Image (cartoon, helix red, strand yellow):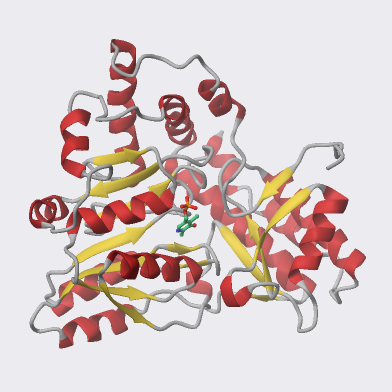
Amino acid sequence: MAHQPGRHFLQIPGPTNTPLPVLAAIAKPTIDHRGPEFQALGREVLAGIRTIFQTEDPVIIYPASGTGAWEAALVNTLSPGDRVLMVETGWFATLWSRMAKRLGLEVELLPGDWRSGVKADAVEARLGQDRGGAVKAVAVVHNETSTGVTSDIASVRRALDRAGHPALLMVDTISSLGSIDYHHEEWGVDVTVGGSQKGLMLPPGLSFNAISQKALAASRDAGFPRSFWAWDEMLAANANGFFPYTPATNMLQGLKVAIDMLHDEGLDNVFARHDRAAEATRRAVRHWGFEIQCADPREYSSALTAVRLPEGHSADRLRAEILRRSNLSLGNGLGPLADRVFRIGHLGDFHDLMVTGTLSGVEMGLAACGVPHRPGGVEAAMSYLNGNLATARAAE
Ligand SMILES: *Cc1c(COP(=O)(O)O)cnc(C)c1O
């Protein structure tokens, strides 16, 4: 492809823009992963990453995409044939359930409409019928990246507690970690799955399992064979700051900087910045006259917004035109939402101008493609951002 002048706008909901200090750390020379310099780095990132999951529990770091950490969560805690309850919030929940089936688990998928999150009442009702404790795990997605819907994980925890059910609770936070408030420990989650390339502002390539004491105990009796993903060998090596096989050394150098950046800004400020960008985006979308895929405002995602185009208009054609004209990438519709929606990522390292710049690219693309809309969405977003300087003030 011919060079396009100007900076590329990567506004898909992950991978996200990697800030220069993180890129610079990754570009440093690779170090001996069995030497003292690495040991200090290993200790620092293994301790630091816990603060992002908001837990004192151990967090394992894999040199793998998020999908690897999905598999690790399942094979370390369960046995072939075990029953797992999942909730069809969208594409990513569906993919995780397909993986569970391929591994030989008995998957029960509570159906969903791809416009709403996990219904804690439905989980409680299902678990209430399971007097024999056949369900070994409940596995849900915190932020469903295909729909822009964030589920209330604390309410899912309460559903398990009210049902008095002993199942493990597993949560995918791949697109919420570092963008949307999440508490592994306080919310009683047994395995939290995370990834590097979304809110953590790193390139793809690292993923995480945060592990409760209950999950650790379950791993001792779990019947799945596992080796690369095995928690016991990881935790034994991690105790000294090392890894059982070559870790992604340079990515860990970047992770250290990313964690420091999140704490320098303050996690609460980071989350508020995401909330604000999301609200600005929704105001533009509503002004244009489009529907937001997430049906319940209480479940709006602060990491991304999925936008429904009017019937008869191709979201993929719009995205292609915006890429060509403005060098701006937007997320595509996944599964049944293909070509029906496009997704605006507003997570990771960005500021107001990137939000309004992104919305400008969309608004110009709408006009170019002849998609009927009310012009002025960008102004609606700007006036919201101008009137709401909460994040800017908090940072002063
Ligand atoms: C991106 C994403 C995944 C997939 O992660 P990979 O790194 O592509 O393997 C899974 N779940 C959610 C919610 C995601 O956003």
Q: Position of residue 261 (x, y in %)?
A: 49, 31
Q: Nearer the viewer, residue 179 or 27?
A: 27
Q: Quadrant of residue 108?
A: bottom left
| 54 to 126, vertically: above or below | above
Q: Judge left or right: residue 78 versus residue 140.
A: left
Q: Quadrant of residue 182?
A: bottom left
For the C terminus, which image quadrant? top right
Residue 183 visible somewhere in the drawing = no
Q: Position of residue 356 (x, y in %)?
A: 75, 51
| 287 to 205, vertically: above or below | below
Q: Judge left or right: residue 3 versus residue 358.
A: right
Residue sitting at 62 percent across and 61 percent down?
279
Q: Nearer the viewer, residue 267 or 96?
A: 96
Q: Judge left or right: residue 54 versus residue 299.
A: left
Q: Nearer the viewer, residue 295 or 15?
A: 15
Q: Nearer the viewer, residue 128 or 104?
A: 104
Residue sitting at 35 percent across and 50 percent down?
69
Residue sitting at 76 percent across and 50 percent down?
328
Residue sitting at 31 percent across and 25 percent down?
42
Q: Quadrant of residue 140?
A: bottom left
| 265 to 139, vertically: above or below | above
